[in-house]
Image (cartoon, grey):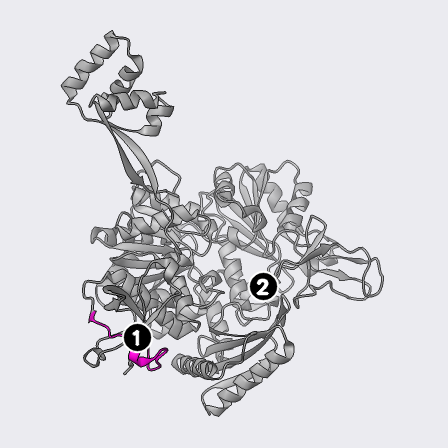
């Protein structure tokens, strides 16, 4: 058993980097665990602290270490739980405890409290009415106006009184001295949900939806397995979520709803707000520090029942959690790209286990990992195979772009798609055009010699932007556009442009009368930009919405009857074992945006590889056909989820040092003599250099996840004893979604 405990004395966020070591008394050795709250001596007093790490290694002179006094049985459960969750994340994903702590406690410091003043009438009604008559007789109009307003509503905002009733501070002060009113200062919470009206909610679930709700509730009462709801686009998963949240709220429990992108927040939160009103809040990176801090405070105090947001909302400090719902659970954004590289799905399952909650995963195109676990029986699989009100799935047409070229159509729009857009514009219906690229993005190459303009600091191509600059999307390096090839001197050097901005220009040229909106990274930089674009399109202020991935996820626009996928194959050419899965998901989700209203929908998928199984399955909207094909491929090549994958990334500013460190780690792994583990590398990742930092990778494959965790633990201990020195970084990533 461990002899010492590293303890955070104060959980206040600015002190997270500071820990203190204490001795564990022999009588407590079996009792002390990570995440536990304890009482410890600190200076000349005793104070609460949180155990974040158990160790046999004394960091100081053992004679100077003090003993833990006692276990605090009155500890706030939620804070202890987050400490324990951080310990679990460090164990399963690597990194330091402090990195994990800063992840599970995303509010780094309390924002300044927002205060407001209220003016309250304290005179009895009869006395106030008599005084009002007296003030009117004496022509004390300002005082009379204030008193009249307070007789209608006994408490008013100070700002309303001064700004709308035009009452001066002197008048308010005089009436306070008279004993007519009081002025109180109260804390108010910033509310990021900018709406005032709660709509009437009357929806009745259909038999299919009700069956799923009943099954989830029964499971939450008994087995508490994670539930995977596989529902086709438009089957009404959101209504199922809301019914379950209402059931949980009836039991005094709260729910977290994770969504993959901030872009989904607006529409999602409005639907939830109409049902639950002010008991709903949101959490995302677009909020001000004050708004973020206030939402966490409201959650702690039990003033909200539902928190909606992307990955970080998982760490909302609810003390009585009922459900964690992960909508569009297949999305790659649920995997963190910073240390610890945790996946929201597994982390949610662990938090649910700690708090007695149930995880609900929902998607029309579940991740291969989730469906694999559901087929094995680890998750409860629930199907919703029909759209609400039996609406048909959209008709899907595949256009072979090779045939378009043969017909001398060089436009980004195929002849079929062009014709269908014309028809929709005449019928006053809406169109969505999707491409998996942003802005004017496109590499710049010489058609004479093939030279590609690359970033001098990163092993990637520069991308052409409209401002005449070539920009690196990894490190931000930029330079002016070139007119002459630096390699051969040819003037035939230009960019391959197929981004949203270029498409917007082409569509405007083809359809000059159409009202067009564009939604991508560049147009959504400012606060509220998502909401403005989406609400404008929802209100039919535009005919065509052009966008990247963010437009195909979870949105519901009843007047959209046509979806065009302009470059279906782009995601197939990524060097990543997820490429076919990602392509199928994007195409199916894009197709699912069409025909959700009264009129049937159509989808046009433009591709150079119409025979690929992911595109064929997307055309048929057949997930199981795709899954069977894809899982055979994963099994054959020993990829997740059949096997597990650990990627070790080694980085250094000196290429030689990165190579040596990678070889040393590979040698150490070989010494472990693990017969069940396949080791590939060291080798170079897809991007071998970023911002002048060289990268090497090792890939470890094993059927048993715990074995890979043990290897990670052994390597961490080895690196602690024999560090490579400054300048060499080591990162671990389990079952990566995006690869290195």
Image x and y of residue 569, in percent: 61, 62
Q: Is residue 64 magenta?
A: yes
70 and 677: which one is in front?
70
| Label 1 close to label 2 by CB (< 8 Å) | no
Q: CA distance from mark 1 to mark 2?
A: 48 Å
Figure check: 700 above or below 226: below
Figure check: 368 above or below 196: below
Figure check: 422 above or below 454: above
- What label does residue 571 carry, if any? 2
Left or right for 362, reference 138? right
Sequence-wise, the earlier of marks 1 and 2 is 1
> Label 1: which residue?
5
Left or right for 738, reference 323? right
Point out the image quarter for the N terminus. Answer: bottom left
- At a point 66% along the width and 54% down the height, the residue shown is 498
Which residue ends up furthest to the top in the rendered image? Answer: 137
Point out the image quarter for the C terminus. Answer: bottom right
Q: Which quadrant would residue 233 be assigned to in this image?
A: bottom left
Please give the range of residues in magenta.
Answer: 55-70
């Amino acid at each position: 058993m461990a002899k010492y405990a590293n303890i955070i004395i104060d959980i206040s966020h600015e002190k997270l980097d500071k820990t203190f070591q204490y001795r564990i008394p022999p009588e407590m050795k079996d009792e002390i665990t990570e995440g536990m709250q304890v009482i410890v001596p600190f200076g000349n007093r005793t104070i609460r602290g949180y155990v974040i790490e158990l160790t046999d290694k004394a960091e100081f002179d053992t004679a100077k270490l003090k003993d833990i006094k006692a276990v605090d049985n009155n500890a706030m459960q939620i804070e202890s739980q987050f400490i324990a969750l951080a310990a679990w994340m460090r164990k399963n994903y690597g990194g330091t405890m402090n990195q994990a702590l800063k992840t599970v406690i995303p509010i780094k410091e309390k924002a300044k409290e927002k205060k407001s003043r209220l003016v309250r009438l304290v005179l009895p009604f009869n006395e106030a009415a008599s005084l009002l008559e007296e003030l009117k007789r004496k022509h004390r109009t300002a005082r009379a106006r204030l008193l009249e307003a307070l007789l209608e509503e006994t408490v008013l905002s100070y700002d309303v009184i001064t700004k709308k009733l035009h009452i001066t501070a002197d008048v308010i002060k005089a009436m306070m001295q008279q004993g007519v009113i009081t002025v109180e200062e109260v804390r108010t919470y910033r509310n990021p949900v900018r709406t005032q009206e709660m709509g009437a909610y009357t929806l009745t679930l259909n038999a299919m939806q009700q069956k799923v709700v009943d099954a989830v509730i029964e499971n939450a009462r008994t087995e508490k397995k994670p539930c995977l709801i596989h529902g086709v686009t438009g089957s009404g998963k959101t209504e199922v979520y809301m019914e379950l949240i209402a059931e949980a709220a009836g039991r005094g429990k709260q729910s977290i709803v994770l969504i993959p992108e901030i872009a989904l927040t607006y529409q999602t939160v409005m639907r939830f707000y109409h049902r639950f009103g002010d008991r709903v809040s949101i959490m995302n990176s677009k909020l001000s520090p004050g708004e973020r801090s206030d939402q966490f405070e409201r959650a702690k105090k039990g003033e909200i029942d539902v928190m909606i947001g992307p990955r970080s909302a998982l760490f909302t400090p609810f003390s009585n959690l009922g459900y964690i719902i992960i909508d569009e659970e297949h999305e790659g954004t649920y995997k963190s790209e910073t240390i610890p590289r945790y996946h929201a799905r597994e982390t949610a399952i662990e938090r649910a286990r700690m708090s007695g909650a149930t995880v609900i995963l929902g998607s029309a195109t579940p991740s291969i990992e989730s469906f694999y676990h559901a087929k094995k029986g680890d998750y409860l699989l629930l199907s919703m195979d029909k759209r609400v009100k039996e609406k048909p799935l959209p008709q899907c047409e595949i256009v072979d772009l090779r045939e378009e070229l043969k017909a001398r159509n060089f436009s980004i729009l195929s002849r079929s798609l062009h014709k269908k857009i014309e028809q929709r514009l005449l019928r006053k219906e809406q169109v969505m055009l999707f491409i998996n690229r942003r802005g004017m993005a496109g590499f710049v190459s010489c058609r004479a010699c093939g030279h590609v303009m690359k970033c001098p600091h990163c092993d990637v191509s520069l991308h052409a932007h409209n401002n005449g600059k070539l920009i690196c999307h990894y490190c931000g390096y930029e330079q002016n556009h070139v007119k002459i090839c630096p390699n051969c001197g040819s003037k035939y050097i230009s960019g391959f442009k197929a981004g949203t901005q270029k498409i917007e220009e082409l569509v405007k040229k083809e359809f000059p009368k159409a009202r067009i909106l564009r939604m991508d990274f560049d147009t959504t930089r400012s606060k509220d930009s998502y909401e403005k674009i989406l609400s404008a399109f929802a209100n039919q202020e535009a005919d065509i919405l052009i966008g990247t991935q963010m437009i195909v996820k979870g949105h519901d626009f009843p007047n959209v009857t046509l979806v065009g996928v302009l470059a279906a194959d782009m995601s197939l050419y990524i060097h990543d074992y997820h490429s076919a899965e990602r392509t199928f998901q994007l195409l199916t989700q894009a197709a699912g945006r069409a025909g959700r209203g009264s009129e049937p929908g159509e989808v046009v998928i433009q591709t150079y590889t119409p025979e690929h199984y992911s595109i064929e399955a997307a055309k048929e909207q057949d997930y199981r056909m795709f899954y069977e094909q894809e899982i055979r491929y994963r099994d054959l090549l020993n990829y997740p989820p059949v096997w597990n994958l650990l990627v070790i990334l080694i980085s250094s500013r000196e290429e030689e040092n990165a190579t040596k460190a990678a070889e040393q780690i590979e040698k150490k792994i070989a010494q472990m003599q693990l017969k069940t583990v396949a080791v590939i590398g060291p080798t170079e990742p897809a991007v071998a250099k970023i911002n002048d930092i060289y990268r090497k990778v090792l890939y470890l494959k094993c059927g048993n996840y715990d074995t890979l965790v043990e290897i990670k633990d052994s390597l961490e201990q080895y690196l602690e004893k024999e560090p490579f020195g400054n300048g060499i970084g080591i990162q671990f990533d389990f079952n990566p979604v995006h690869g290195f």
